Image: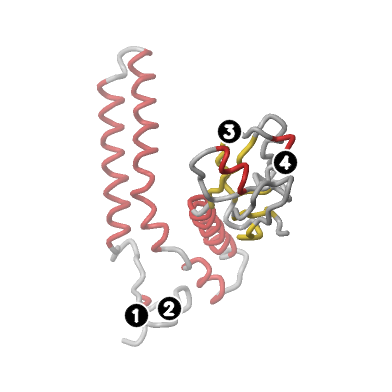
Amino acid sequence: NRYSYCFNNPVNFIDPSGNTPLSTPDNPLWYDKLSMSASDSIKGAKDYLFEEFSSTKIAAYSAAILSTGLDFFSGPLHLPAKLGHLGEGTGEFMARPTLDNAPKMLMDVSLTAGILSTVGTQLNTKYLKYTGPGSKPVSYDKMGNVNKGTWLTKKKYKSFTEAENKLQIPLKSRPIGNIEEVKVPWNQYIGGPKKVRGNDQWGEGGGIEYRVGGF
């Protein structure tokens, strides 16, 4: 059967390679089985909590809190199913671009954006900012981006004195007495690395610095 890969429904389901089976309620794949098992287990646990701990208001409140905790910790168990179904809504919309199918595609878009955001957060690059009495603290805009023009480094020097000699630390910011860790979002442009030139104001130079927004 040439349409067996999509359970004889090539209008609603597409698969360009013809090698990936789809998960349906009648024939669920492993990720849907995992999600359903998690849902059943959580439901059973909740029923038990509310049956056993509903005699007093305090017990009922405690059961409600535990129930919320179960929902929170079971969330990751549903992620494989969400990823497994990613693209099905878009495929169905492309096959039949109707208003009824549009929400399915939007769900794909929303899930993809959530995944990218989560991954992007983990990929934030860590930098260091050496500061002294006259230094301005690192500031951020409303989107959480580091403001442009901020000078940063990645190297942790053995002493503040070494940092003063290597980096572009203005005289008014000396002596250095603090190291601030700065996370730059993965999608924010930062120029560098650039080797700092030494002069009377900056010290001997030779350190490596980066500048948010470029040089």
Query: What is the CA distance from the residue labelled 2 to the residue labelled 4?
Result: 61 Å
- Between discs 2 and 4, the one toward the N terminus: 2
Q: Residue at x 60, y 72 (%)?
A: 97
Query: What is the CA distance from the residue labelled 1 to the residue labelled 2?
Result: 7 Å
Which residue is identified by label 3?
178
Q: Locate residue 31, reporting x and y percent.
A: 31, 59
Q: Locate residue 141, reporting x and y percent.
A: 71, 43
Q: Quadrant of the N terminus?
A: bottom left
- Between discs 4 and 3, the one toward the N terminus: 4
Q: Given contact means CB atoms under 8 Å apart, are the residues at marks 2 and 3 in contact? A: no
Q: Quadrant of the C terminus?
A: bottom right
Q: Tell which tag, 2 or 4, sits nearer the viewer.
A: 4
Determine whether 148 is above or below 71 in the image.
below
- Between discs 2 and 3, the one toward the N terminus: 2
Q: Secondary structure at mark 3?
A: strand
Which residue is identified by label 4?
170
Q: Secondary structure at mark 2?
A: loop
Query: What is the CA distance from the residue labelled 3 to the residue labelled 1?
Result: 57 Å
Q: Tell which tag, 4 or 3, sits nearer the viewer.
A: 4
